[in-house]
Image (tube, helix red, strand yellow):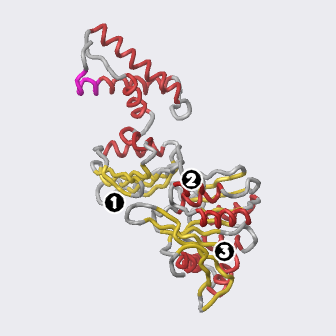
Amino acid sequence: MSLASPATSTRGLSAVAERVRERLRTEEVDPARDPDRAAFIARAEVRRHNDFALARGVDVIEDEAASVRDILSTVAGYGPLQALLDDPDVEEIWINAPDRVYVAREGRSERAPIVLSDTAVRDLVERMLHATGRRVDLSQPFVDASLPDGSRLHVVIPDITRRHWAVNIRKFLTRFRTLDDLIAAGSVRPEAAGILRTAMRDGTSVIVSGATHAGKTTLLGALIAAAPADHRVVTVEETFELNAQAPDLVALQGRQPSLEGTGEVSLRRLVKEALRMRPDRLVVGEVRDAEALDLLLALNTGVPGAATIHANSATDALRKLASLPLLAGRNIDRDFLLPAIAASVGLVVHCRRDASGRRAVVQIVAPTGRVVDGAVEARQVFGGETV
């Protein structure tokens, strides 16, 4: 039996992959829904190739298992990126250019040994968007979408970018689903976890603050998991990212407008619809615009909430929460907003990522219910930072 050269092996795999793709199409097999059947077809086609190669005295494909994996990545997965998506240590993947692919592990970035082409990048994005119902084109050069595994995809194309497509895939790390998981990882101190568990049990509204990549969404998912089992949780997000676990949970995501400019479902609309679904806790994945007003109104009707917000500290988060509702464009001023925040927000939890990439809860503050000198007064209940 002769060993295949790399060039011959590549040509052989390409031919086999094309036959596998044709069989999947003919037999109407969806690899995402029936991976076992797809693997069976790929294995059968590799063996068929080798039987033909042996009969003709040409090179065979030696490593059947590896070849099947490569073929499935080509026809059903995401090609060269599939191994990174399958790697549990990879938190995020981004493509700045076809020859500049990066990943983040434990909060730190590194360049990946992958070289693509412009066409390959476009094909990967189109494959990722195929099942989402979303699109990216000149009329809509940005797109946010959720992949089948819960990862979040964000794409920007030229001429918004200078030359190449910019692709970002933020993975959901399933190993950090609960507060106990975060304690084990050193991200949450046991005393802080105790405060947060009590807040979730008692229906206290919690705001999670921090910079980008500080672990806000991961912590929010763990808080949802800490809610009482009999609580009905409704989550609203622009794009599914939380992937939270709770016995009684409904997850809602927004929708971009159609080509005709119709059919958009905003985060503000989702918050209003969620209130009609009898929530014991309303969760907003990220508050960054006028939906802050709708969230605040919901909290002041007695519905406990939880949300994330970009901020540099816990007290900065309270200031920002008092400013964002003004974007709603209604006759609302801070004289209404500040007392409403002071009365309805129970805790603000601040997350931080240090220079080594480690993420941790560094501060928890509790509003006292008072407004002092034009700001919501808060006392520190965990952490060493100045309030």
Disc 1 marks a residue whose amino acid type is: Thr
At label 2, counting other C-alpha atoms closer than 10 Å, the crowd grade (few under 14, some 14-19, many 20 or more) is some
Disc 3 marks a residue whose amino acid type is: Val
Q: CA distance from mark 3 to mark 2?
A: 26 Å
Q: Is residue 357 left or right of residue 115?
A: right
Q: Is residue 114 left or right of residue 259?
A: left
Element carrying mark 2:
helix
Above or below 125: residue 2: above
Q: Nearer the viewer, residue 376 or 166?
A: 376
- Can you tell which mark lies on residue 161? 1
Q: CA distance from mark 1 to mark 3?
A: 39 Å
Above or below 262: residue 373: below
Mark 3 vs mark 2: in front: 2
Range of magenta residues: 4-11
Residue 275 x/y as whole percent: 72, 63
Q: Which residue is mark 3?
A: 345
Q: Residue at x 43, y 25 (%)?
A: 22
Q: Which residue is mark 2?
A: 181
Element carrying mark 1:
loop
Q: Is residue 6 magenta?
A: yes
Q: CA distance from mark 2 to mark 1?
A: 38 Å
